[in-house]
Image (tube, rainbow, N blue to C red):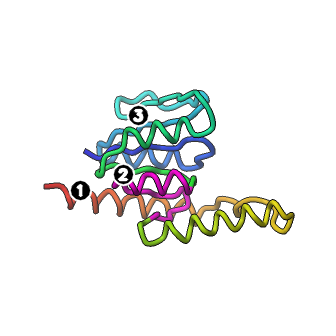
Amino acid sequence: MTTLYVDADACPVKDEIYRVAKRYGLPVIVVSNAPIRVPKDELISFVEVRGGFDAADNWIVEQLKPADIVITADIPLAERGLTKGATVLGHKGNEFTEESIGGAMAGRALQEMLRQYGEFGGGPAPFNKADRSRFLSKLDELIVRLRRRRP
């Protein structure tokens, strides 16, 4: 069965994930390094992982199976999830794939270098309704695709 793992720190689509998971009857595991309130629902659980910067990411990767979906904006976590065979979706509806992750990692490294030299500031563009809609559509598409693959 597919499990949805949510890298919950700064994830703006948790409520949407809960609704979609409930519709399909899929378990959701919300993972963070600090307490987060989640709905009381037998399909939704929260795991607090302490122990450093990547502790929550490490926990998620250790749990992953190929039928699972990871929801994260963290590009290194996305790469690790793909390595484990999981499907990875960004909170703006972008699916990370084997074909796209190299470019995403390179872009991340370039942005970091530019920030260090003071050439690049700010963060990502604000999250908007179109992002939310794209996310919902893509999450639904991924779940359907994974269900079709099941023997």
Identify the mark at residue 9; answer none if there is no mark: none
User: Which quadrant of the figure contains the N terminus?
Assistant: top left
Q: Residue at x 57, y 27 (%)?
A: 50
Which label's residue is closer to the chain start, 2 or 3?
A: 3
Could you say whether the residue bearing mark 1 is in a helix, strand or loop? helix
Q: Nearer the viewer, residue 98 or 18?
A: 98
Q: Is residue 143 left or right of residue 34?
A: left
Residue depicted at 71% across the width and 65% down the height: 111
Q: In the figure, is residue 43 to the left or right of 105? A: left
Q: Quadrant of the C terminus?
A: bottom left
Q: Which residue is mark 1?
A: 147
Q: Amino acid at mark 2?
A: Lys
Q: Residue at x 51, y 68 (%)?
A: 102
The residue carrying mark 3 is 44
Pointer 2: residues within 10 angstroms few (<14), some, or many (20+)? some
Q: Give SS at disc 3.
A: strand
Please report the residue visible at 42 percent of the width from the left and 37 percent of the height from the top.
Answer: 29
**Inter-mark Cα distance, 1 to 3:** 20 Å
Query: What span is colored magenta in the figure?
Result: 75-96
> Residue 73: horizontal and vertical position, in percent?
57, 54
Quickly name the residue at label 2: 84
Choose mark 2 or mark 3, whichever is in front: 2
Q: Earlier in the sequence, mark 1 or mark 2?
A: 2
Percent position (x, y) of residue 84?
A: 36, 51
79, above or below 52, in the image: below
In-front residue for pair 114/42: 114
Q: Quadrant of residue 125?
A: bottom right
Q: Is residue 84 magenta?
A: yes
Residue 45 location (% of width, % of height): 42, 30
Q: Quadrant of residue 28?
A: top left
